[in-house]
Amino acid sequence: MLEVKGICSGYGHVQIIWDASFVVNDGEVVAILGSNGAGKTTLVRTITGMIRPWSGSVVFNGDELAGKNSRNILDHGIVQVPEGRQLFTEMSVYENLEMGAYSKETKAKLGESLEFVYKWFPKLRERKNQAAGTLSGGEQQMVAVGRALIGLPRLLILDEPSLGLAPNIVDDILSVAHSMAKEQGISVILVEQDITKALRVADRGYVVENGKITLEGTSEELESNEHVKKAYLGI
């Protein structure tokens, strides 16, 4: 589905990502792991067109997307849930969800998509007329994920979904992401610094350190890796 080859990118003259390559298959949850400041968010912003790559290739279902703008990449079905959620806090839950319907196709399927979102997050139906800013952090994250699902993603990117949330809420969000991949065939990139939680739901993972992918493997392989144990799992 997604094949990233030799991506280099950064901000201005400062290089952040160095020769990054990874693959995401259909219906797979792939974790992009690493500490804060490792370059994870810059990497996914490069994939989604928010940052133009300096070099390298991003192929999605046979189409080259490197250098395309964010709208073009969105039209291909790559939808990102940004770090920090970025909701319109004074607007209602329904209005925030509605913002995910950006194209003729997604507008035409809004009613169906809303029911799909409410199936995964029943609380959002109860809160649909409530201002998003009055929700708990976990409920706001549900709105952010729901808004992305309204966009009919083929590949969903979750950027630091655990940020600022209670552990049980994080577990719920990640469980939904895993179920969507396995039951609906929506591929998921999970960008996380909480490696323990990420590896519980991911099929495979890549570890980013100082802008470079230094390790890759199945969740089981990474959990048993001595470097990962010492540097990230505290074992």
Image: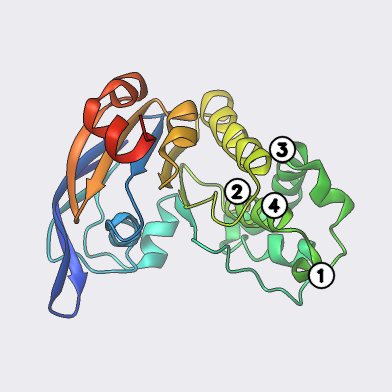
Q: Are marks 2 and 1 in contact (CB under 8 Å)?
A: no
Left or right, 163 with reference to 216: right
Q: Are marks 3 and 1 in contact (CB under 8 Å)?
A: no
| Dot 2 crowding, Cα within 10 Å, few <14, some 14–19, many 20+ | many
Tell me the SS state at disc 3: helix
* The one of 162 and 104 positioned closer to us in this rendering: 162
Q: Nearer the viewer, mark 2 or mark 4?
A: 4
Earlier residue among tags 3 and 1: 3
Earlier residue among tags 2 and 3: 3
Q: Nearer the viewer, mark 1 or mark 4?
A: 4
Q: Amino acid at mark 2?
A: Leu
Q: Which residue was labeled with disc 2?
A: 149
Give the Cα distance between marks 2 and 3. Answer: 10 Å
Residue 184 visible in this rendered orientation of the protein: yes
Q: Nearer the viewer, mark 2 or mark 3?
A: 3
Give the Cα distance between marks 3 and 1. Answer: 20 Å
Q: Amino acid at mark 4?
A: Gly
Give the Cα distance between marks 2 and 4. Answer: 17 Å
Residue 30 in picture, x, y percent from top left = 37, 35
Quadrant in which the C terminus is drawn? top left
Q: Which residue was labeled with disc 3?
A: 120
Q: Which residue was labeled with disc 4?
A: 138
Q: Amino acid at mark 1?
A: Ala
Q: Are marks 4 and 3 in contact (CB under 8 Å)?
A: no
